Amino acid sequence: MPNTPASEETDRPGAIPLHGKPYYSLDAWCKNTYGYKCYKIALNAHMTCPNRDGTCGTRGCIFCSAGGSGDFAVDTADKSVDEQLCEGVRALHGKLGDASDPTRPNLIAYFQAYTNTYAPTGYLEKVYSEALSHPRVLGISIATRPDCLPVEVLDLIDALKLRYPGKFIWVELGLQTIHEKSAEYIRRGYALPVFEDAYFRLKARDIPVIVHLILGLPGETAEQIYESVRYVDARKPFGVKLQLLHVLRGTDLADHYLAGEFKTLTREAYLTLLADCLELLSPDIVVHRVTGDGSKKDLIAPTWSSHKKDVLNALHRLMRERKSHAAGPHNAL
């Protein structure tokens, strides 16, 4: 188990303002950077994935739903990015604030479903630009695979950074685990050196990276999970997503679960594991997620994860009891 920091945020001059959470959350980053709360809108850009189209597989990752991990994308049909953003704004009505100024930028356009660099660059430029041009969008976050980042895609991102200098472009990489046995089980489809290469090519171009890890993969011990977290922390990404393993209907993982091949984590076990992992991260790494986001209608297990607010409150309470508070220099874009 990692060592628990003993100092409170207020004990450290110059500490990052955490805005009520015991770790550096995306919400805190937004408030520190822009001065107000921001909201993420998940998008479906109608792409596919090499793990589905036959390039390296046809069934996707073992945990991936038919929506390509984009179950919360606002798209319900063949809608454009602009249409989806407008629909997302309507869905957030009442939360966005400052209604007197509808052009106030406080949205993050999240290209979530499937692999969002897996298309011709002309199409990628179209959909990325459509989001970046929206007056309420602060920037875009592009979820993809490390094996889908050819040089022409990185060149495009560089060009868009120059074209939209006031907006950010983040790339999210689905690492999930550093352990090859687990990677084979989940059918990740690439080896760890592929992630290494993609990560450092992005870093070399000053493109902020958010790394995804899954906690609770079948067969992984707590120490193996800590090893994955330490590995990511050593590379100092802009952000991390710590994702609870959850079982969704229609996935191959669901078949394994229903056959009794593994059990999901209890709430208490997950909270302890998650607090341990957060204590291993450098204080200036932005934590973009600490739980699961499975659709309630498709969620098989663990059912407790559907009560997200309760889970977050319990995590924050546990970390305060343990005196786990992150504080350090601001991680600039």
Image (cartoon, grey):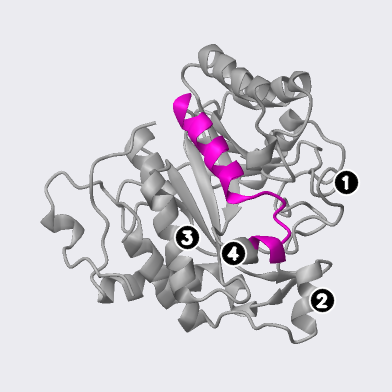
Q: Please identify the quadrant where the N terminus is shown.
A: bottom left
Task: Tell me the SS state at disc 1.
Answer: loop
Label 3, secondary structure: give it: helix
Q: Which residue is mark 3?
A: 228
Secondary structure under badge 2?
A: helix
Residue type at tag 4: Gly
Please tell me the numbered disc located at residue 54.
1
Circle 2 is placed at which residue position?
255
Q: Choose mark 1 or mark 2, whichever is in front.
A: 1
Q: Is residue 158 above or below residue 248?
A: above
Q: Is residue 234 above or below residue 250?
A: above
Q: Which residue is mark 4?
A: 292
* 16 over 326 or under it: above or below: above
Q: Quadrant of residue 277?
A: bottom left
Q: Main secondary structure of the magenta part?
A: helix
Is residue 147 or residue 324 the one in the foreground?
147
**Highlighted range, magenta:** 183-206
Label whose residue precedes the other's in the sequence (1 or 3): 1
